[in-house]
Amino acid sequence: MTQLDVRPMAGNTGDGDPADGMRAKGLSGNSVGLLGSAVIGVSTVAPVYCLTSTLGSTAGEVGLQMPAVFLAGFLPMLLVAFAYRELNKVMPDCGTSFTWTVKAFGPKVGWMCGWGLVIATIIVLSNLAGVATSYFWLLAGEITGSDDVAALDGNKAVHIVTCLALVALATVISYRGMTATKGVQYALVGLQLVVLAVFVAMAFGKAGSADFPTSADFSWSWLNPFAVQSFGAFTAGLSLSIFMYWGWDACLTANEETTGSTRTPGRAALVAMIVLVGSYLATGVAAQMVVGSGDKGLGLANPDTSDNVFAALAGPVMGPALGILLFVAVLASAAASLQTTFIPVARTVLAMSTYEALPASYSKVHERFRTPGRATVMAGIATGVFYTVMTLVSGHVLVDTIYALGLMICFYYALTAFACVWYFRAEVLRSGRDLLFKGLFPLVGGLLLSAVFAKTLVDMWDPAYGSGSSVLGMGSVFVIGVGLLLLGVVLMFAMRWRNPAFFQGKTLTRSTPALVAED
């Protein structure tokens, strides 16, 4: 295991008792390299799943400018990724956003930032489990040629039991450590990217043929975000695009288990981002060229197929035999992300518990696997309970919960970006590099995400947003999104009453020395 020591961080005085420094968690060091870390980042995002579920919705909002919106969504994420990289260099702590915002802004802001990450991850885990379940039965129906088998997904009891089984399996794999996680991910990520590449190549090859009357000729205007018909449509598309990049920071939360913990996770995040934007652009352009972005026939915006584009395009574009591979790829994408998404939530909870912001029981690490065992199991149970309750209450509530996710994502990413600017405020004028990567880039990224947060908050008020449900005249998405944030406030004050030391700045402050791995 890597050796750890306490050293003052750049920009702090180094004062204080080293015993109060950033704390080792007992995780297994040097378990993941650059490739493994990048794979975890890509896997958590689940590119094939994101594409099949959002290509149609994005095309419905912005039409042929969908590739431009993918690029626009990439920009704030890239700028925030620089903030993550710079903060990780001086604070390679698995608490990431939580730890860094505490260091920059104090315990209350830090606690809420950690809550935003945790609740967003639980929502995503629930959604991924549901998608994996649906594609499991859809694939089973395709393989057996039985509509009755595929229809089992519509049986609520069967769906919930299957979903809980997949969550339990993902929990077990994550519980057994980063080595087990890495091995599974190489296979699943490799499979989905290869199948996606085959789909793109075949779509390009069939674009313009008589079999696809809605095909569209490529135009460079597709990459122009200013060609979107309205600002409202652009922000709606941008919100979907930002969701498609969420999860790349999972490789940062594994920093204490990564070889070269101060540098490798940041590099892996940038590699993951490049793979993602390349995949999204290639698929978006290819899909529009072969079927167009309209709402007729196989057009991407057709409301009958827009929520699951690949299910509609698999056979026509790839043929019956290869089309099954696309179903396999979506299932692999959702399953892979379901498993790796346990990494950020479990390690954030571990860090929050270690610094006494959550009950101490979640700070326990499994003696053999060196993983946050109790935090991982808690995340699995919370996911299963959340999905079961939401499914039994109403399918509309579950859908609106997913729409509320964008609010959480913008919330904690923007806070992390601003934390970088504030933490390094005394250093940004030392050099041109510091000005860009510690100041300007994170600031612009944080402002862009804050603007999306504010616009989304306003749009959510309208009951027409999401499923169209309302509560006391307010959109149910607004009620869910704001309600979850307010729940975090309530829990924060409860923890402040139970464990005052963290909120009094006794366990983690700006002057706390960093825990640096000797690589």
Image (cartoon, rainbow, N blue to C red):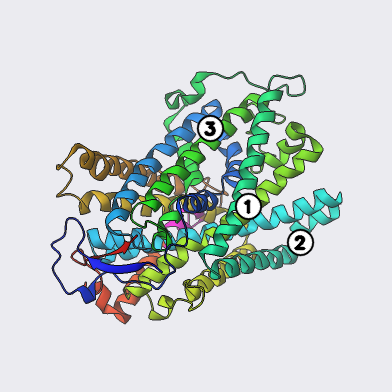
Q: Quadrant of the N terminus?
A: bottom left
Q: Residue at x 31, y 68 (%)?
A: 4
Say the numbered circle drawn on residue 393.
Answer: none
Sequence-wise first label, 1 or 3: 1
Please tell me whether residue 451 is drawn above or below residue 150 in the rendered image.
above
Write down the region rendered in magenta: 471-484
Residue in front for this viewpoint, 116 or 86: 86
Q: Residue at x 64, y 54 (%)?
A: 131
Side of 135 relative to 402 (left or right): right
Residue 268, image x and y in percent? 43, 48
Side of 306 relative to 373 (left or right): right
Q: Quadrant of the C terminus?
A: bottom left
State the CA–CA distance, disc 3 to disc 2.
Answer: 36 Å
Identify the residue under disc 2: 155
State the CA–CA distance, disc 1 to disc 3.
Answer: 23 Å
Element marked by disc 1: helix
Residue 362, image x and y in percent? 43, 76
Say the numbered circle drawn on residue 281.
Answer: 3
Q: Mark 1: few, some, or many residues within 10 Å (few <14, many ≥20)?
A: few
Identify the residue under disc 1: 187
Sequence-wise first label, 1 or 2: 2
Q: Mark 2: few, some, or many residues within 10 Å (few <14, many ≥20)?
A: few
Say which quarter of the image contains residue 27. Answer: bottom left
